[in-house]
Image (cartoon, grey):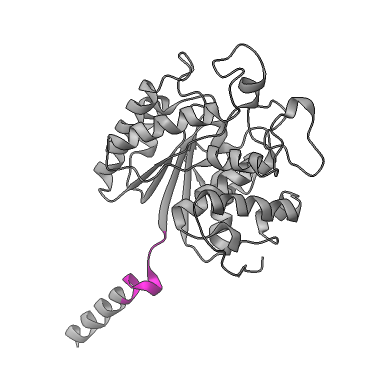
Amino acid sequence: MKRRLVTTVLAAALALSGAGGALARTVLFVGNSFTYGQGSPVRRYHPERVTDLNGEGIGGVPALFRTFAEQTGQDWQVSLETAGGQDLAFHLDKRAGRIDRAWDVVVLQGYSTLDAASPGNPARHVAAALRLAEMMARRNPAVSVRLVSTWPRADLAWRPGSPWSGKPLGALADTVAAANRQAGEGSSRFGPPLPVGAAWMRAVEAGVADPNPYDGTAFGQVDLWTWDQYHASTEGYYLEALVAFGAITGVDPRSLGARERAADDLGMNPAVTVRLQQIAAETLGMASATAPTLRKR
């Protein structure tokens, strides 16, 4: 009788470890205001859907990711650790105790100009990224670490006095992307960077987004920056989240469709929602869209 009971318990445990009872995958977002959604309602968007390791009630881009995942049947436990105005070295030096655990995927978003004291210099960013990746790999050797290649800042491109003044709008995004490629070449822990800056520029080049908010936003276009022309608008953070979601899960962002829940909650124009999904998918090299199969609220 006892042997039969043990056999039954073992069988139940094996069943739970199979596809039907598989544990959710885990993803940690580490970053600053570009991750938590400064300057838009994204910052406080459904913080209950994610775990804020700092206990600050942030939803941000991670909450958008979780919302997309729920609608497409993806089971992800989403956590975040963010600090405004900080780079990756800060999280390594000051927040390691909160993030040093096993994760399936870790998203690292650094300072917008790589180094506040030496804008454009990749050394500090690359060194911290490599050390964070190694720390994460000690906890889970199979971890995938993804660096975020962030967007160009209109305030640095269109106003005088910055290293990117007078250069093409995408120059800063190219600088960050190059640093992330450099980090990736230094460790096999990294998966492909998340090409948010490339998606931003694709939106501009496709006429979806206005390139220069300082001369007004053209009719029929959106402003991907918020009021400071530095941080993203709601639409900008939405595009960032779409790129992260598509790159990490492999789900085509276009499958979310015009009725996508987060965009509706945030009051976005459905036509803009669809166009940003298209931009994200094209940036990620996804050839064809799948039919939308959204779940009801």
Task: Examine the structure image and report whether residue 19 is included in the region drawn in magenta.
Answer: yes
Position in image of residue 80 (x %, y %): 48, 42
- In the image as oriented, which residue stretches furthest toward the left? 3
- Quadrant containing the N terminus is bottom left
Tell whether position 151 is magenta.
Answer: no
Quadrant assignment for the C terminus: bottom right
Percent of width and height locating residue 142: 28, 51
Q: Compared with residue 50, is residue 169 higher up or lower down, i.e. above or below?
A: above
Residue placed furthest toward the right: 219
Q: Considering only vertical position in the picture, is 174 above or below 160? A: below
Q: Locate residue 173 relative to residue 236 in the image: left or right.
A: left
- The majority secondary structure of the magenta stretch comes to helix
Please indicate, yes or no, whether residue 59 appears anywhere in the rendered image. no
Q: Residue furthest bottom?
A: 1
Residue at 73% over, 29% down? 213
Residue 66 appears left or right of 249: right
Up-down relation of residue 1 to residue 268 (above or below)? below
Count of marks, rendered view: 0
Q: Quadrant of residue 199?
A: top right
Q: Nearer the viewer, residue 258 or 90?
A: 258
Which segment is the magenta one?
Answer: 15-24
Q: In this rendering, would 247 be left or right of 233?
A: left
Between 77 and 153, the one lying in front of the other is 153
Within the image, what quadrant is residue 181 found in? top left
Left or right: 158 with respect to 144? right
Residue at 36% x, 21% y is 123
Task: Compare residues 237 and 21 and report the one nearer the observer.
Answer: 237
Residue at horizontal 37 percent and vertical 72 percent from the top = 19
> Residue 182, image x and y in percent?
34, 31
Res. 194 visible in picture: yes
Q: Picture coordinates of residue 225 (x, y %)?
A: 67, 33
